[in-house]
Amino acid sequence: MANGKLRIGIAGKRGLAFLAGLRAFPQSAEVTAFCETDAAARQIGAQTHGIPRSFADFDALLADGNLDAVVVATPMPLHVPQSVRALRAGKHVLSEVTAAVSLDECWRLRDAVLASGKTYMLAENYCYLEANVLVGELARQGRFGELYYGEGEYLHEVRALHHDAEGGPTWRAFWQVGARGCTYGTHSLGAVRHWFQAIDPAERIARVTCLGTGARTDPEHWHDDTSVMLCQLRSGKLIKVRLDMMSNRPHLPSYYALQGTQGAYEAARVEGEPGRIWIGANRPDEPRQWRSLQDFDAHLPADWRALAQEARATGHGGGDYHVGRAFVQALLTSTPPPIDIYAALEWTAAGLCSQLSIANGGVPIAVPDFRDARQRPVSLDAPV
C-alpha cells in the first residue's frame, strides 16, 4: 500500500457499480486504475468517476506497480484466467459471478488462491439485498427454528443481451443460454446458502439434480425457458433454484422463500410490495397469520441501517455498495471475506453440476468439496 492506502484497479465497466463501496473508506482505500477494452466506455468511465489511470489491456493493468487489488468484472469466461493472473501478480481479487465456467476452472482457481495467500471474494450482490440481510439476521437469531428448506428464483427475461448491435452473438449467448442447466444460479442460490451458513458454517451442498422445460420461447438458443435445480445439503436439507432468462413475463429476479421448524418467509411476487413472514411456537391453537417483513426492520444489523441511504443510491438495491465495502473492509482488517473462495466455488459448482444432471435426465450429481484436496481430479495440471 502506498501512503498507507489500499490501491484498487477495476477491470470491466460493470465493476464501476461497486465504486461507491470501494470508496467507503476514503482515508484507507482508493480506486486508482480502470481497464476496459471499449475505448469510449474506458474514457467516459475514467473521467466520470475521477480514476487517474486507464488501460485497454488487463495485463497492462496488472503490470501497474501501484495496485494492491483488482476487481474482475469482465465476461464470465474471463473470470478465472484473469483472477489467476491477478493472484499470481500478488493482487487481491474481487470477482463477478459466476466464479468459473467449468469444474476444471474451479480447481485451478482454488489452487491459485491457496498458493497466493491473497484474498479472493465473490461479488454476489444478491446476498446483500436488504430483505435478504434481514431474513439472514432473523435466521441467525434462531427466529425460524431449524432451517430445512429454501427457495430462490431468478426470472429475468434478458434476450436482448444475447446479441450485439449487429445481430451477432454475445458471450452470454454461449455461456449463459448456449447450454442447458442452471448456468446463472448464484443470485438465487447464494442468498439462500448464506442463510443456512449463518446457522451452520460447516454445511455444504452435497448433490444436485436438474430438469428443464425445453427451449420454447426462443428456440435459437439451447437453454430451457425454465430450469429447476434441487440442491440437497450434506445434512439432507433442500434448496430449490429456478432459473428463467427466456419467458415472456414481468421480471422477478429476487424471489426467495425460507422454511424452518418455527417460521417461514416468502418474498413478494410483485415489485414494490414487502415480503411476508410468520414466526410462532407451533401450538395447535396458535393463529397463523402472515406479517409484513417490514415489521422486523429493527432487526437489521446496526451498520446496515446506518448505511442504508448511501447503499440504496447504488445498484441492485444497495447490494453493489455492500459488496465493494465488504471486500475493502476484509482487506483493511485482514479478516476473511464474507463470500470466500470455498463459498464461491460451491455455489458455482452446483450450477456446473446441474448441467451434467440435466444432460443425463436429471440424475443426481455429486458436488465436489473444494476443501478436500483428495477430490481434485488427477487429470488436472499440477497445482499452481
Image: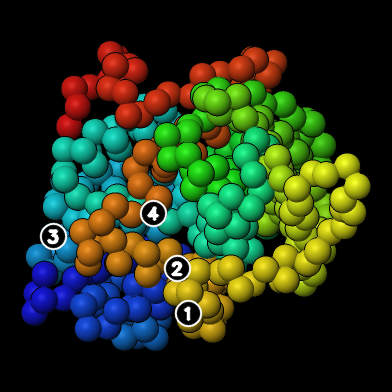
Q: Residues within 10 Å of mark 2 (few under 14, many from 20)?
A: many
Amino acid, disc 1: Leu
Q: How far separated are the C-alphas under marks 4 and 3?
A: 28 Å
Residue 143 as seen in the image, left or right of residue 347:
right
Q: Residue at x 35, y 78 (%)?
A: 24
Going from N to C along the chain, the mark reached first, 2 or 4, is 2
SS for callout 3: helix
Q: Quadrant of the N terminus?
A: bottom left
Q: How far separated are the C-alphas under marks 4 and 1?
A: 18 Å
Compared with 214, 141 (above or below) is below
Which residue is tagged 3?
A: 63
Which residue is tagged 2?
A: 322
User: In this rendering, which labeled residue sits more in front, label 2 or label 1?
Assistant: 1
Q: Residue at x 91, y 47 (%)?
A: 285
Q: How far separated are the C-alphas under marks 2 and 3?
A: 28 Å
Residue 152 as seen in the image, left or right of residue 78:
right
> In which quarter of the view is residue 14 placed?
bottom left
> Mark 1–mark 3 contact, CB under 8 Å?
no
